[in-house]
Amino acid sequence: MSTSQPTPVRGRFAPSPSGRMHLGNLCCALLAWLSVRSQNGEMLLRIEDLDPDRCTREKAELLMDDLSWLGLTWDEGPGHERTHAPYCQSARRELYESALSELRAKNDVYPCFCTRAELHAVSAPHAGDGTFRYPGLCRNLTPAEAEEKSRTRRPSLRFRAPEDTVTFEDLYCGPQNINVQSTFGDFIVRRSDGVFAYQLAVVVDDAAMGITEIVRGCDLLGSTPRQIYLQHLLELPTPHYAHIPLLMSPDGRRLSKRDRDLDLGELRARFGTPEALLGWLAGQTGIAPDTTPRSAEQLIEHFSWGVIRAHRENITITVE
């Protein structure tokens, strides 16, 4: 009798080339890489350049140079092309169009003509994180009403979220139970300018690229139930997720590319070697027992999600 083999672990680092990586991005990339390598899995690099106004090829090249300098190698992606190419989302639009057509056929999307100002006027931020719950202003427009509005404004497309609770187990945060409709409302899958939204694009790409594990910042925890809804409707597999805390600046702000907070240019100059930088970060976040300089490869033996969860209070560090 044959026995089924376990599915090989495939992780990914999927940065947006909108600016130089900062320390928070590095922490996320390192944990994703270590989790995959500790399980003898494969790492994929995908460039999430959906927004043409913010993302450039030059920034993507700089990002890949920083990852290579750090020793955070990838088995598949730019420079290591295999069957899942292309690896830039700007070249994968046809796949998103196909998924959107499936959602349209099931009547799971509808046109929304609301402006940002209109939504801010009628909505309150959710959970203090600045996320607004969509109040459903365009959800029940008749075809005639939608046609009339489309004469003066191009609509975005929203996913019609049901009143269901999504349950999943996060590798870092533990059990999660989130009702998308009551928490976020219907969410955008394609913007009014034709750019596909993050929620739909990553669902399509993660499935197409065989991703089984996703490590990212806790600011994206609310994205997961929305993506699980889409996975179920499109009959796609659901990966395992781990959402790690964000790193903070001395004044309590989350690190941001736009503020150039401790970006890799400054960090490379400050620490001199990748071993010094990775060792310091590993010691600060509880990956390793101290800040001794270590290469990415040398950190593999220290990594486990159990160790990371045990340092739950310390992984959110204040950078000096």
Image (tube, rainbow, N blue to C red):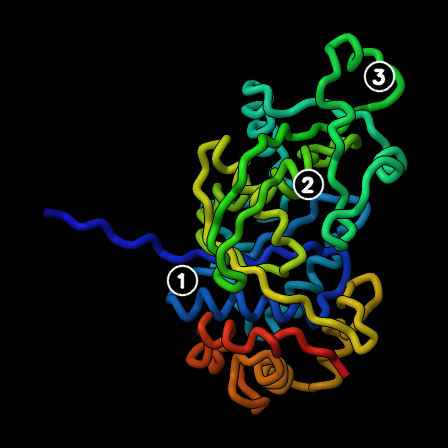
Foreground residue, 259 or 177? 177
Is there a contact, CB below 8 Å, between mark 2 and mark 1? no
Rendered location of residue 158, percent (x, y): 69, 30
Which element carries disc 2, helix, strand or loop? loop
In the depicted structure, whether residue 297 falls above or below residue 257: below
In the depicted structure, whether residue 162 falls above or below residue 294: above
Residue under label 1? 41
Quick check: 238 left or right of 160? left
Residue under label 2? 184
Residue 39 falls in image quadrant: bottom left
Separation of marks 1 and 3 at Cα, in angstroms: 50 Å
Rendered location of residue 265, percent (x, y): 76, 74
Separation of marks 2 and 3 at Cα, in angstroms: 24 Å
Q: How many marks?
A: 3
Residue in the picture at 72% in, 69% down: 22
State which mark lies toward you, 2 or 3.
Answer: 2
Question: Considering only order in the chain, which callout, 1 or 2, is on the residue closer to the N terminus?
Answer: 1
